[in-house]
Image: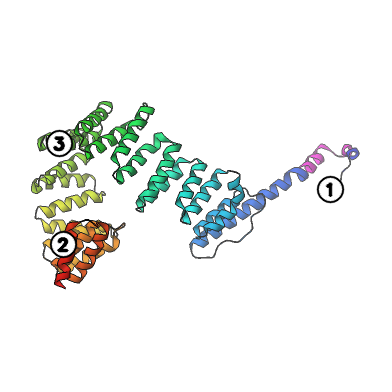
């Protein structure tokens, strides 16, 4: 459309408005339509890809600002981290936050976790690093968990302290974990995380058998939040473990029940301390009350079943184990415990089968699983199988004298 300046006076205002729309507005509408159409097409294809259709190959319109991110995510989902990096390369170089997050994800997918942490840290998003740290811990990659946890902590010490302290505790570095929390409490005296820090310091001190510090931190937590159930329970366990006797512990746990009678933590603690005292029959009622109030907590149910087994109520215990296997068929721990119940019931074939399921499902591999498997196989008169798992146990605990003796015993049998 070619309109000279002198000719503008020949047009009515309405005509001029329509001409302006044609020149300035319509192209934008067309671009928006193209962006929306491609987005819908991509979304449909993405759903189909999840059903097994090959990757989407449509070319996005030039005006689509998010297309490169979507395509990069699609490449990652398809297992092509290098392609994902290529798609967002220019945006990454510009320091775009979303692109940096994808770049980090691509590096992690390619097995370059330290590089991924550096890029995520550059993106500056605490949640991304915290989630990566937790995933690494779940996968048994504690060094990677600490690496990501430290980077997350540097971005936000207030939020990141508890997570990093947990990882340090996982590797047994309790001194570093304790110092970390103490320092951040000093730096952030009014933090909303303060109660959690006091509880963590109490737990670390209890693990270290530093009873004076443990009592101090749990008491301080209760002073600041008198309704704190974890602090009350922690204080009870400190009194019990420092040698003040079961009555001192029971008093604290009774206080928990008085504070929260409709919750199960106090009943569970009562059962646990009685279990420690080998008062299994007396503990039965407390575990039952705890599980009744928290029927979905499978760890509590497992504790109840184990106490019934210790009390000699094997049929009731096995009923609970079977119920848990039906509800949580991929949970290795319940097969591990059921194997021992079968051992006590003198059912070798069943015990062996349960132990084999536990070995298959365990993740990561645990020394205790191989050790118990060896005991069960040896008892079931399967020395070859026992020797195999004892050797696997030794790889996880090379200095364990009991395992070494068991291996010698199996070699002599063969």
The picture places residue 2, in percent across and down from the top left corner, at 86, 46
Residue 242's disc is 3
User: Marks 3 and 1: in contact by CB < 8 Å?
Assistant: no
Secondary element at image label 1: loop
Q: Give the residues in magenta.
A: 8-20
Q: Which mark is residue 306?
A: none
| Position of residue 398 measured from the top left corner of the image (x, y, whole percent) | 24, 57
Quick one: label 1 or label 3, which is nearer the N terminus? Answer: 1
Kindly tell me whether residue 382 is visible in this rendering: no
Q: Is residue 412 above or below residue 305?
A: below
Which callout, 2 or 1, points to the residue nearer the camera? 2
> Distance between the Cα atoms at labels 1 and 3?
92 Å
Say which residue appears at 12% left-offset and 59% top-offset: 315
Tell me where residue 263 sits by quadrant. Answer: top left
Q: Please tell me which residue is depicted at 58% across the width and 47% down the height of the picture.
A: 92
225 with respect to 107 (left or right): left
Judged from this view, the residue extending furthest toward the right is 6
Task: Find numbered disc 3 in the image and state the secondary structure of the residue it sits on.
Answer: loop
Mark closer to the chain start, 2 or 3: 3
Q: Compute the Cα span from label 2 to label 3.
A: 34 Å
Q: Magenta stretch containing residue 187, yes or no?
A: no
1 vs 3, front mark = 3
Q: Nearer the viewer, residue 241 or 44?
A: 241
Which disc is residue 405 wearing?
2
How many numbered marks, from 0 up?
3
Distance CA(mark 2)–CA(mark 1): 95 Å
Which residue is label 1 attached to?
1
Q: Is residue 84 visible?
A: yes
Q: Point out the tag, 2 or 1, that comes first from the N-terminus.
A: 1
């Amino acid at each position: 459309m070619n309109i000279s300046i002198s000719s503008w006076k020949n047009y009515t205002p309405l005509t001029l408005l329509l001409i302006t729309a044609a020149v300035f507005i319509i192209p934008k509408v067309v671009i928006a339509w193209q962006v929306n159409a491609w987005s819908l097409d991509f979304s449909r294809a993405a759903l189909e890809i999840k059903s097994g259709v090959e990757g989407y190959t449509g070319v996005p319109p030039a005006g689509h600002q998010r297309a490169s991110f979507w395509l990069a995510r699609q490449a990652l989902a398809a297992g092509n981290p290098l392609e994902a990096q290529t798609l967002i390369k220019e945006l990454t170089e510009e320091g775009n936050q979303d692109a940096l997050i994808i770049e980090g994800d691509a590096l992690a997918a390619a097995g370059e976790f330290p590089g991924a942490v550096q890029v995520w840290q550059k993106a500056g998003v605490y949640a991304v690093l915290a989630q990566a740290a937790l995933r690494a811990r779940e996968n048994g990659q504690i060094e990677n968990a600490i690496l990501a946890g430290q980077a997350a902590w540097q971005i936000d010490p207030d939020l990141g302290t508890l997570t990093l302290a947990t990882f340090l505790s996982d590797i047994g570095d309790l001194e570093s974990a304790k110092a970390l929390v103490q320092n951040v409490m000093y730096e952030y005296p009014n933090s909303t995380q303060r109660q959690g820090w006091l509880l963590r310091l109490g737990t670390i001190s209890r693990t270290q058998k530093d009873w004076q510090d443990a009592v101090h931190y749990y008491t301080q937590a209760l002073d600041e939040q008198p309704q704190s159930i974890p602090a009350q329970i922690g204080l009870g366990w400190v009194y019990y473990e420092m040698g003040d006797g079961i009555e001192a512990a029971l008093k604290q746990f009774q206080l928990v029940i008085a504070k929260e009678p409709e919750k199960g933590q106090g009943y569970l603690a009562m059962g646990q301390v009685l279990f420690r005292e080998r008062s299994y029959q007396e503990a039965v009622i407390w575990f039952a009350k705890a599980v009744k109030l928290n029927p979905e907590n499978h760890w509590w149910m497992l504790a109840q079943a184990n106490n019934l087994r210790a009390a000699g109520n094997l049929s009731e215990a096995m009923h609970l184990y079977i119920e848990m296997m039906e509800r949580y068929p991929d949970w290795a721990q319940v097969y591990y415990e059921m194997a021992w119940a079968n051992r006590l019931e003198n059912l070798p074939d069943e015990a062996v089968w349960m132990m084999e399921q536990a070995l298959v499902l365990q993740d990561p591999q645990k020394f205790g699983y191989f050790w118990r498997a060896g005991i069960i196989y040896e008892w079931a008169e399967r020395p070859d199988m026992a020797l195999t798992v004892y050797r696997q146990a030794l790889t996880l605990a090379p200095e364990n004298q009991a395992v070494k003796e068991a291996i010698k015993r199996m070699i002599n049998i063969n």
